[in-house]
Image (spheres, rainbow, N blue to C red):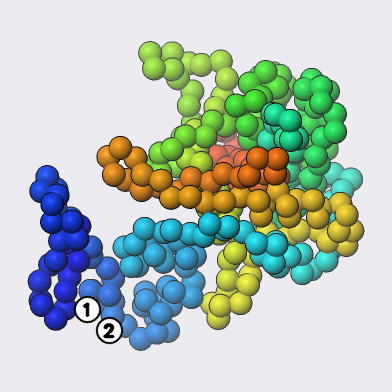
Amino acid sequence: MKEWDQEAKAWIPQKPENHAYSGYHVTQRMAPWIITLPPEDLRSIDSKRLRYSERRFLNEVLGLFYRGLAKPLLPEDLLECTKEGREFTFAAGLNPPFVSYAGIDWGGGQFAYTVIWIMAMDDLDRWRLLYVHKFAEKDPMKQVEIIANLINTFNVKQAVADIGFGAVQVSELQKRFASRVYGCQYIRRPELPLELKDKDEFGQRIAQMIVLADRSFWIETAIDKIKRRDPVGRPSPMLVLPWANPADVEWIIDQFTCIEMEEQETVSGKRYHHYTHPEGQPDDALHAFVYALIAYHSRKMGSELGIVDLFG
């Protein structure tokens, strides 16, 4: 990749030993039709700096790779989501036409628990957590029964569940709810963050309805919702956690903040983010939130049900 040197008025290669390909780092700061805009113009760099997430600003405006943080979420980030101090307003469930979205991360391993996360969008486009539960029950089929009841109780429009540890459970839920429940398989494919997989490599329809989701993209989408700031730079998270009774939800803070980011590189030299967590520190609640976000964004892959979002 070549960087522009303003003093030398020349493109300077960063790795001169590479001869097979030549790239040029072009940013919006090089565009005269952008840098001459007044700061109040929504197309200006100053305006985008305030409105865009860190990842989007670095990628789209500066043309840089988003490195993120080794610890992308801190407890104070989650506590910003609790400012309203409200209770689980709809703990008894939802009645049509109001709907919610659910994510299910099946527990696998010694320290992991199955977690279901149910949320709905309010009139400010924020996600309000309606219900979250960490299962002490270990029997997968009993978990399926409980989750099926919750899908009905909260009138879940779309649910997405981890299929890695839950192929059988997802199959059972799809027998009851068909395309209202998708299985989710994480992949590494940022150029296509979400895809409905309904056929195998031979073009034949597959039995289970599955979405393929780029793992890093969707984790970073969840992080952006939590760390969002308003136009003047103040925290303005797009996730609202009920905090009237902290004991009900404070356990999720550990499961969100335990994740760590490391930068890796493919054989072809392309860099990407890999998110992990220390052994013995589960992150099931975070992934349940991620699956609920995927559920919302995958809703148009199936048929519309003619019902409306909560608070909408």
Check disc 1 and report its element: helix, strand or loop.
helix
- Inter-mark Cα distance, 2 to 1: 6 Å
Q: Which disc, if any, is residue 32?
A: 1
Amino acid found under the numbered disc labelled 2:
Thr
Disc 2 crowd rating (10 Å Cα; few below 14, some 14-19, many 20+) is few
Could you tell whether 19 is left or right of 272 in the image? left
Looking at the rendered structure, the secondary structure element under dot 2 is loop
The residue type indicated by label 1 comes to Pro
Q: In this view, does 88 lie above or below 112?
A: below
118 is higher (above) or lower (below) than 199? below
- Compared with residue 259, is residue 225 higher up or lower down, i.e. above or below? below
- Which residue in the structure is indicated by mark 2? 36
Q: Quadrant of the C terminus?
A: bottom right
Look at the numbered discs 2 and 1 and tell me whether their residues touch, using CB distance below 8 Å: yes
In percent of width and height, residue 281 lies at 70, 44
- Image location (x, y in percent) of residue 190: 40, 44
> Can residue 158 be seen?
no
- Frontmost residue, 95 versus 277: 277
Residue 199, quarter of picture: top left
Look at 75% across and 39% down and name the residue there: 116
In the image, 162 versus 125, the foreground residue is 162
Residue at 14 percent across and 81 percent down: it is 7
Which residue: 74% across, 44% down? 118
Instruction: Write the residue at 83% across / 66% down.
Output: 85
Let me know if residue 92 appears in the view: yes
193 relative to 139 in the view: left or right? left
Residue farthest along the bottom direction in this orientation = 38
In the rendered image, the quadrant that contains the N terminus is bottom left
